[in-house]
Image (tube, helix red, strand yellow):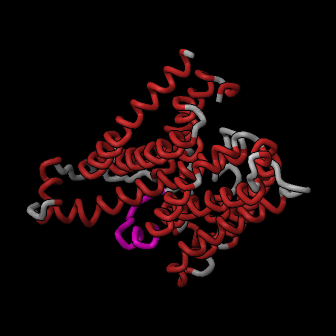
Amino acid sequence: MMDLAKRTSRRRWSIVISPILLIAVTCYGLSYGSVSVSLREIWEVFTSSGEPLAQKIVMNLRFPRVLIGLLVGACLAASGALLQGVMKNPLADPGVIGVSAGGGLAAIMCMIVFPNLSYLLPILAFAGAFLTSIIIYLLSWSSGSSPLRIVLAGVAINALIGAITNGFMVIYSDRVQAVLPWLSGGLSGRSWYHLSFMAPYAITGLILSLFAIKTANLMLLGDDSAKLLGQKVELQRLSLILLSSLLAGAAVSVAGLVGFVGLVVPHAVRLLLGDDYRFLLPLSIVGGASLVVFADTIARSAIDPIELPVGILLAVIGAPFFLYLLKKRGVANA
């Protein structure tokens, strides 16, 4: 009873704190960098009375990058949360089961083998993530699918895609330099152009994920219970996997292979607020968005003038934090 009261209190506080956190992180991302911009100057920029230099820094450089960071983090966290529900495994993640790697391989092939077709990169990233999801689902099928078989098939496909990616990098070693920053995951140089082709897919995926909350909660009951309630379990499982691949593909198409967000954020939110997707999914979206923008701001300002890929910094932050969560609460309580 005490645990229920604590969890209810945490949920109420999270609803209050999460929008404040999101606004604070957004302001932080707009303010800090090689040149600092005060909150007053940012306000003046958005009220059309800012200085030309501040206008250029905020509107041309930082604002699109912050918006992309928000969408990337939100998409990865939502994708991870949905996959963890489908797999009934709090350690599931689009990077672990190969969905992100599939989108990444398609994008790498575009950049290395067909550099003149770079404008197709986002479409190919989506296609790669979708195709990988379908292959994983088909490989896991044996008179129906199961969460365990999906995870095992995903791990195997992830390893295979990793080997193919390394093979391309060896064969086209003279072109590897162009894709290394992308493989590390980063938002450097991202602009309104990148936001324009990523935002429709990302926003659509996020909206659909919110409509899938009821389905995700039903999947937690188990296949037999869901079937007794009249649910088409296999169709719903496939739809959630494809939705996760849409979200992961949207993130991969502009940010590259950014890890740990889809793993750590939903897991941390689950430990704090429980398994109810009415709270888990929206708070994971806010948490993922905040984490990526916060990490990207540090990555581009910590070692000036060198800009670290945000994927590296997220791994440095995420791995110890995840180990701390496991040690503090235990896998059995996840």
Q: Which residue is drawn at 59% across and 69% down?
A: 125
> Is residue 245 rendered to the left or right of residue 178?
right
> Is residue 138 rendered to the left or right of residue 164?
right
Q: Looking at the image, which is closer to me, 310 or 21?
A: 21
- Residue 92, compared with residue 143, is above or below; it is above
Q: Residue at x 57, y 36 (%)?
A: 319
Quarter of the C terminus within the rendering: top right
- Residue 28, compared with residue 125, is above or below; it is above
Which picture quadrant has residue 333? top right
Can residue 109 be spotted in the picture? yes
Q: Can you name the residue that lies furthest to the bottom here?
A: 116
Q: Can you name the residue that lies furthest to the right here?
A: 143
Q: Looking at the image, which is closer to me, 240 or 46?
A: 240
- Residue 256, compared with residue 79, is above or below; it is below
Q: Residue at x 66, y 56 (%)?
A: 240
Q: Position of residue 293 (x, y in %)?
A: 39, 49
On whether residue 144 falls in the magenta region, the answer is no
> Is residue 27 rendered to the left or right of residue 257?
left
Q: Where is residue 239 in the image (x, y as percent from the top left)?
A: 68, 60
> Is residue 190 rendered to the left or right of residue 37?
right
On whether residue 197 falls in the magenta region, the answer is yes
Q: Looking at the image, which is closer to me, 74 or 51?
A: 74
- Residue 152, compared with residue 235, is above or below; it is above
Quarter of the N terminus within the rendering: top right
Q: Residue at x 42, y 70 (%)?
A: 194
Residue span colored magenta = 186-198
Can residue 183 be spotted in the picture? no
Q: Where is residue 30 in the image (x, y as percent from the top left)?
A: 26, 52
